[in-house]
Image (cartoon, rainbow, N blue to C red):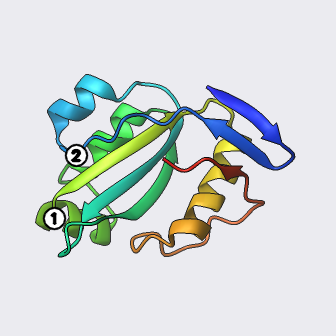
Amino acid sequence: MVENNFAGSVIVDWSIFHGNFDSAEIRRYAPMEPGVYLLWRKNKKNKWIVFFVGQTEDLEQTLLGHISEDETNPCVKDLIEHHDCGLEYAVISDKAIRDGIVKFLVDHYKPKCVTKDPGGRPIEVNLP
């Protein structure tokens, strides 16, 4: 669900944090719906930090793709293989809203594995 808060800002319903980033967890919880997502890793101080922000038309399939051998982002692949990783997502059907939220999240978190600015106008969103 997306709720307009004020001009240029929305409130979304984030999923619970999933600290087991594996296919069973993804299949059990991630819907086959469009949305935005955050991939987290635990650092040496046991603090969770965002390493990737993305959007998709199918959260389940995209998240499964990140843990497959076919992952094309070497940074994502390396972190998933060598760190404890987790995820959060929000179902958002409107592509323009997803674009703006991703821009805001990339600007806010500056995730290590996002090397290209997504462009566009950021839409401020409540953080998980």
The residue lying at 48 percent from left, 75 percent from top is 115
Single out the residue that lies furthest toward the right: 7
Q: Is residue 71 above or below residue 75?
A: above
SS state under label 1: loop
Q: Residue, x 32% and y 58% (percent of image)? A: 40
Q: Residues within 10 Å of mark 2 (few under 14, many from 20)?
A: some
Q: Quarter of the image holding residue 25? A: top left
The residue shown at (15%, 64%) is 83
Q: Secondary structure at mark 2?
A: loop
Q: Amino acid at mark 1?
A: His
The residue that label 1 is drawn on is 83
Kindly report which numbered mark, 2 or 1, lies closer to the viewer in this rendering.
Answer: 2
Q: Which mark is residue 19?
A: 2
Tell me: 98 left or right of 115.
Answer: right
- Distance of label 2 from label 1 (alpha carbons): 11 Å
Q: Is residue 4 left or right of residue 107?
A: right
- Residue lying furthest left: 82
The label on residue 110 is: none
Q: Are marks 2 and 1 in contact (CB under 8 Å)?
A: no
Q: Is residue 125 above or below residue 74?
A: above
